[in-house]
Amino acid sequence: MEIKTLQVGPIGTNCYLLCDTASARCAIIDPGGDAEAVAAAVKASGASPCAILLTHGHYDHTGAVAELSAQWPEAPVYLSRRDQSGDNAPPQLFPHIPGAKDYGEGACIAVGTLTVTVLATPGHSEGSVTLRCGDALFCGDTLFAASCGRTDFPGGSMVKMLDSLYRLGSLEGDFRVYPGHMEPSTLERERRTNPYLLQAMAQHGESV
Ligand SMILES: [Zn+2]
């Protein structure tokens, strides 16, 4: 498993290439912009995309989907239906992604020999998910290094965010944390120092 990080778009969204070196297949996670740069990184990786996985539907995570889909039509796009339409998904914030497949809690997506498991982690948006693969967590805008995503957008909820952070904090063992913005971290470091994660754990009566 190899993970390549690209910062894309005007507000520096992290796009990740999750590559299975054994099969030369990859998933593109949150291509928020700069389709050409993402495509160049895919080609440089030598792996062919088998899926485009979206942690949530905000435009800064989805901006390059259309161009990349046109280039690799065999790679389906996955996005929770909760971020695809409805009152909590206004189109200027949640642009329509034609052909996106719904996914959510418990879904498993194969990336070559790797398996990505979906954890529903609402709070930043209704349809926010965290993608788990091996010891890596792609948290989107749920868990950040030393922070968490905003909850004041349509569909956001601080109550749900704290439940989702609690859930991530309760995962057994350590994980590499790959957030939707800013630098990576580890779950152990966040359990010790992240004020929102500490609040979420304290609220559930856990000592950390
Ligand atoms: Zn967002």
Image (spheres, rainbow, N blue to C red):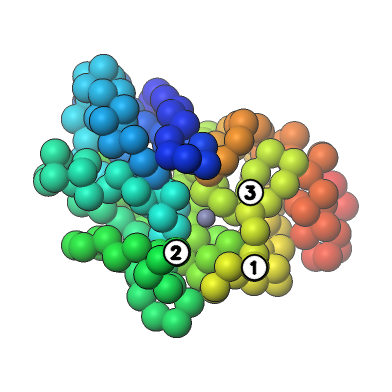
Query: Mark 3 against mark 2, which lies toward the viewer?
Result: 2
Residue lying at 71% horizontally and 63% vertically, measured from the top left? 162
Dot 1: few (<14), some (14–19), or many (≥20) neighbours within 10 Å? few
Q: Is residue 90 above or below residue 191?
A: below
Query: Mark 1 against mark 3, which lies toward the viewer?
Result: 1
How far across and down, in percent of the image, does residue 156 sit? Answer: 59, 69
Q: Quadrant of residue 67?
A: top left
Disc 1, disc 2: CB below 8 Å?
A: no
- The residue pinned by badge 1 equals 152
Say which element carries label 3.
Answer: strand
Residue lying at 58% horizontally and 68% vertically, measured from the top left? 153
Q: Amino acid at mark 2?
A: Leu
Residue lying at 51% horizontally and 70% vertically, measured from the top left? 126
- The residue pinned by badge 2 equals 93
- Direction from residue 166 to residue 30 in the image, left or right: left
Q: Amino acid at mark 3?
A: Leu
